Image (cartoon, rainbow, N blue to C red):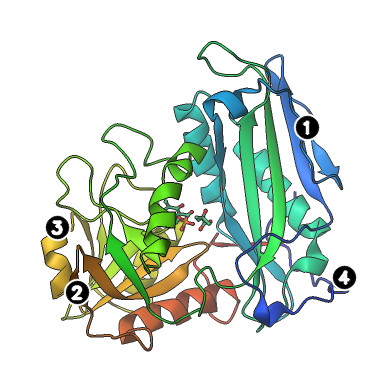
Amino acid sequence: MVIEERRTQKMEKKNIDWSNLGFSYIETDQRYVSHYKDGEWDEGGLTSDANVVLNECACVFQYAQTCFEGLKAYTTQEGRIVMFRPDLNAKRMADTAKRLEMAVFPEERFLEAVHKTVEANAAYVPPYGSGATLYVRPYLFGSNPVIGVKPADEYQFRVFTTPVGPYFKGGAKPITIRVCDYDRAAPHGTGHVKAGLNYAMSLHAIVDAHNQGYDENMYLDAATRTNVEETGGANFLFVTRDGKVVTPKSDTILPSITRRSLMYVAEKYLGLQVEEREVPFEEVKEFAECGLCGTAAVISPVGKVVDHGKEICFPSGMDAMGPVTKKLYDTLTGIQMGQLEAPKGWIHVV
Ligand code: PLP
Ligand code: COI
């Protein structure tokens, strides 16, 4: 497999209004599928069929034995198509699969599968400068009938792609979030892996948040409800008034690849002090800036946190990203889009 070879994509782009895309599903031409049966994965390959047909008793339907990943493909300034740190998605999916008693899709094959799927859908990778990207969604589920509570014996690993714009409407405009009364993840539970079930249980909380006029939920730790955890789909970054970058450390949040990359960028590219530690909710009012970070969210600035009617307004305000958040955003996206030199191994050329 070619990992870091330079190749320009010449495929003609689809006629899509790239700059006005939201974060929603658009069917693309090809997707990858591999089946696991009798203890082994088949050869796998691309298909144009976007539908999955399964038995009514498939483990994924009855006991939610499913997990997923999310990464993006970008067009760089020189017109290359690249992916950002897909090896870390491969590793995280393997960790998730083990926790859910699923067959692990080999990490090398994961890389090959996302590579092939993006290559086959190159016409859907938004052009450089459009603000859009191709979102890549690898997923894995138990596919054979299971009625007693036990793991499946058969699995499908799939990858589809869809072109997307910003996760939050308004792009870089600060959002308002609320402290959520529901928990996202239990101690010793599945909060640290990317299990579909974590998202199923967050759906009521997000619908309720939207109905109350908030963009997202801030989850606190379920055991003590005193420390900041994450949102339903992103980790937190805070900036202290003296310019340090702080991110919550917890065993029950998803280890965000974007957050890990941003902490590195903050320290090594921007010379900032960084701290990964418990963040008591009581401390939130002391911070100068707050952002949500993730593949979909990139860094979405938070202007306000509402705790049961009590507002915490960050000095960065509701109009634009705070200055440190903006620097982090520009540096990370600069690396992803090929304007800045990336640390070794971060950029996978398709
Ligand atoms: N936290 C949750 C719950 C998520 O769903 C995601 C998205 O993947 C993240 C954090 C951010 O992780 P990453 O930066 O790896 O996309
Ligand atoms: C991602 O950022 O890739 C995610 O999986 C988050 C999801 C809620 C869209």
Residue type at mark 3: give it.
Answer: Pro
- Give the alpha-carbon distance from disc 1 to disc 3, as whole Å: 46 Å
- 125 is higher (above) or lower (below) than 323: above
Give the number of the disc on residue 312.
2
Q: Nearer the viewer, mark 1 or mark 3?
A: 1
Q: Is residue 318 visible?
A: yes
Q: Are marks 2 and 4 in contact (CB under 8 Å)?
A: no
Q: In the displayed structure, does residue 20 sit left or right of residue 92?
A: right
SS of the residue under disc 1: loop
SS of the residue under disc 2: strand
The earlier-in-sequence mark between 2 and 3 is 3
Residue density around tag 1, few if under 14, some if 14–19, many if 20 or more, within 10 Å: few
The earlier-in-sequence mark between 2 and 4 is 4
- 163 is higher (above) or lower (below) than 45: below
Give the number of the disc on residue 219.
none
The earlier-in-sequence mark between 4 and 1 is 4
Q: Are marks 1 and 3 in contact (CB under 8 Å)?
A: no
The earlier-in-sequence mark between 3 and 4 is 4
Q: Nearer the viewer, mark 3 or mark 4?
A: 3
Q: Are marks 2 and 3 in contact (CB under 8 Å)?
A: no
Give the number of the disc on residue 11.
4
- Give the alpha-carbon distance from disc 2 to disc 1, as whole Å: 48 Å
- Give the alpha-carbon distance from disc 2 to disc 4, as whole Å: 48 Å
- Residue 82 image point, x, y percent: 67, 66
Q: Is residue 264 visible?
A: no
Asked which quadrant contains residue 291, the reply is bottom left
- Residue topped by disc 3: 280
Foreground pick, 208 / 68: 208
- Residue 87 image point, x, y percent: 56, 49
